[in-house]
Amino acid sequence: MLQLTDVTVRYGDTAAVDHVSLDLAPGQVLAVLGPSGCGKSTLLRAVAGLEPLDAGSISWDGADLAGVPTHKRGFALMFQDGQLFAHLTVARNVAYALRLRRTPSARLAERVRELLELVGLAGYDDRLPGTLSGGERQRVALARALAVEPRLILLDEPLSALDASLRERLAGDLREILHAAGTTALLVTHDHEEAFALADRLAVMRAGHVVQQGAIDEVWREPVDEETALFLGYARVLRDQAARRVLDAAGLPSAYAVALRRSALVVDDDGPLRAVVESARVTPELVRLVVGVEGVGTVDAVGPLGGRIAPGDEVSLRVDVTRLAVPPITARS
Amino acid sequence: MTSPQARRLLALVLLAAGPVLVLGALFVLPVAGMVAEGFVVDGQFAPGAVLDVLARPRVHRVAWFTVWTSGLATVLAVVLGLPAAYALHRLALPGRAAVRAALLVPFVLPTVVVGVAFRQLLGEGGPLGFLGLDGTPVAIVLGLVFFNVAVVVRTVGVAWESLDPRPGQAAAALGATPWQVLRTVTLPALRPAIVGAASIVFLFCATAFGIVLTLGGVRHATIETEIYLLTTTVFDLQAAAALSVLQIVAVVCLLALAARLRATPDPTTQRAVAPVRAVRRSDAPVVVATVLVLVAMLLPILTLVLGSLSVGDGWGLDNYRALTTTGEDQALLVPVTTALATSLRTAVDATWMALLVGGSVALIVTRRSHFVAERRLRSTLDGLFMLPLGVSAVTLGFGFLITLDEPPLDLRDSPLLVPMAQALVALPLVVRTLTPVLGGIDDQQRQAAASLGASPWRTLLTVDLPVAWKPMLAASGFAFAASLGEFGATSFLARDTDPTLPVVIFRLIGHPGAMNYGMALAASVVLAVATAAVMLAVERLRVPGVGAF
């Protein structure tokens, strides 16, 4: 198992990674989620052995990895854009690590075929990376990383270079492949959708610190502070009076703050909250509204399609308790 | 062809007409004149004589000597240059910039100066005199390596610097040892740069003149020095012409090969420079190799400086004071200081000429082509202007003498004759410095400027110039330094009353007398300092491609 204890990496005077501690159990996928520049890529590179640590330690199964060079760690690293070797064919890319280990050629050919099949690229053996699409390149990169059955696979925003529809499809595939291979994986990303699609556990990173970590639904339900909530896709964080009023309407215990997703308030004639519609926008699934709620202020809400809701209308709203979170914020923070 | 295409082609041809005319009059004409000298006997076309010359045993010896010394020097330059290229372009070595500049200096050092320095180092009484290398082919090879390590360091270093480190890291993460990463990822990626550098170095070695002449004399001649000896001492013009033809054919083939092998970067991708890495203990071999190369580079120069300062049994500046005189036994017609002034004046003229022609060539060849015929024309132009890089400066100089002596092109008495020849020699350097920069500008930037209402002129001013002014300055410095040290063509063209500094130095070492030799050393130091100062200034501009081919 991978263990990071108080890991610190500095660039000059600034600490890109500041006293980060993480654990990763075998077979699990941990996503480190954070905005760009938060130090998550540096953390990943440090685990790979590409950045020297200024303090702390990284260990595997209890053995400290300090001084173990990248090529002896047995952690495969998959870059954002694949980083395929442009001068080698797909098959040779996948077989790269196997050749380094002088795998007999029959075994090698079989393994390459297996891996290409696993990533859905059977028959691509002789293509050059330059002729592949972005998604195909990522699949080859994944096959290449999996070839030697690494004890840990490091993924640097594996999907973010792809367009939206491809990303969704490949995310599903990637999760399946990782689970099928039983691989332990550490993933860094700035996209919470990517994290949710792939990971079991989540660590939220900001300005070099890990501000929260836990099982993915746990973090999702209880973001530790307002910034984390907003980063996880919550649209607004209400405080004080407004928060109490919403929680009350939801039938939940009172708290100082509540984080709402855009669909947390739903138009419902029997709902307890009264609101005036400020704007309405039709989307393929529902109508997105911005409403002024009495005693709460301006918030987002959703209504059914075909309801003919227009700005200026008065509506009633109910609260969907699965679409809000109660961050442990007090009046001081 | 539709009419807009025809219009584009016409515009291109008109734009290119200027530089092509200059090249035609000042390069093709003289070289052709020199070649014709061999093929035409008494007004009759007689190629038989040329073939006879090529069958001479001495010619075979000379050709073989050229090939093996150049080949060996190329291999050595690459082997020594690669570690230095890595250390100086990828590692955060202290004093990196200064060392890089120092390694660039030999490349622009006047060949005569290097010849003098090596004789001082290897000759009797020199620090390495006990090796008995003076006057041997080994000395020539060492001299050639000295010149060309810089080319390898630069060319490969620049490629290495912009090499994405991530494929290597990906390989390491897949279990490749540093050595395996080098062999399977890094070297394949660098291969175009290495092969390109090697072919250019071979070209420089095979056409080297001043260094071979000063170190090899008559005994060890290469094709280049043989041409010189045949024209100036034996007056066998036919043989000289035959050798010129042989050389031109070989050079054109090599250049074509180099062009094919040269990495053609995708002009739309921005050139990214990977950040340098802190030095680790495992880098020790590379760093040690680099330091050794640096020491080997400094040794001849140091010997030269010490030699210039030694007077009789002690030290002094007498040799430098003597530079205002015409030397012992009136070895010279003008004082060395006058020659220095002539050199500087000539270099200024050569620089603006090279920049004017080279700048327009670079501009023309880097514009985006819209169709095949246009692209072909542009790449032909690109190759055409590389020619002076490989064609013997001696051929050029002698060709100038025999073709530019009658109206409408009677330039024999023009003060611009020498600058013109030097500008031609410097032209490829200018083109090579500017083309990657201009080619690296994303054409969409120009299109964006145009769509915002900028005229072509305005686009040039606001898009190209801000990126290109520093490289232009660097190219000027490079041309200036090259012109200061130019010896091959100048030795033919400079009038006895108006010699440049390299010519004077060569004359001084040819005259007996301790004072003359001391003056030659002092003058060499002065010339070396002048060129080094220019190159240091160029290096400060931090233009990545300078000196890379």
Image (cartoon, rainbow, N blue to C red):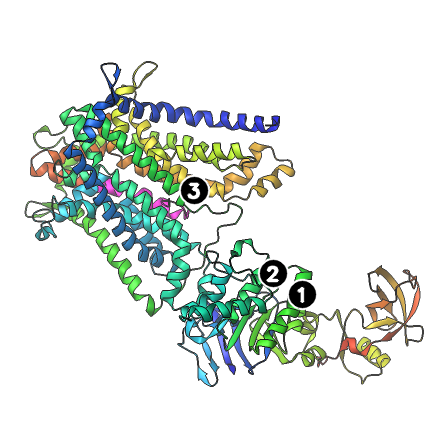
- Main SS category, magenta section: helix
Q: Are marks 1 and 3 in contact (CB under 8 Å)?
A: no
Q: Residue B48 colored magenta?
A: no
| Dot 1: element | helix
Q: Which residue is mark 3?
A: B471
Q: Residue at x 37, y 41 (%)?
A: B257
The label shown at residue A169 is: 1
Q: Amino acid at mark 3?
A: Pro
Chain hosting mark 2 = A
- Confirm whether residue B476 shows in the render: no
Between the C-alphas of marks 2 and 3, the distance is: 39 Å
Q: Which residues are magenta?
A: B524-549
Q: Chain of mark 1?
A: A
Instruction: Name the residue nearer the viewer: B358 or B32.
Output: B32
Name which residue type carries label 1. Arg
Residue underneath mark 2: A135
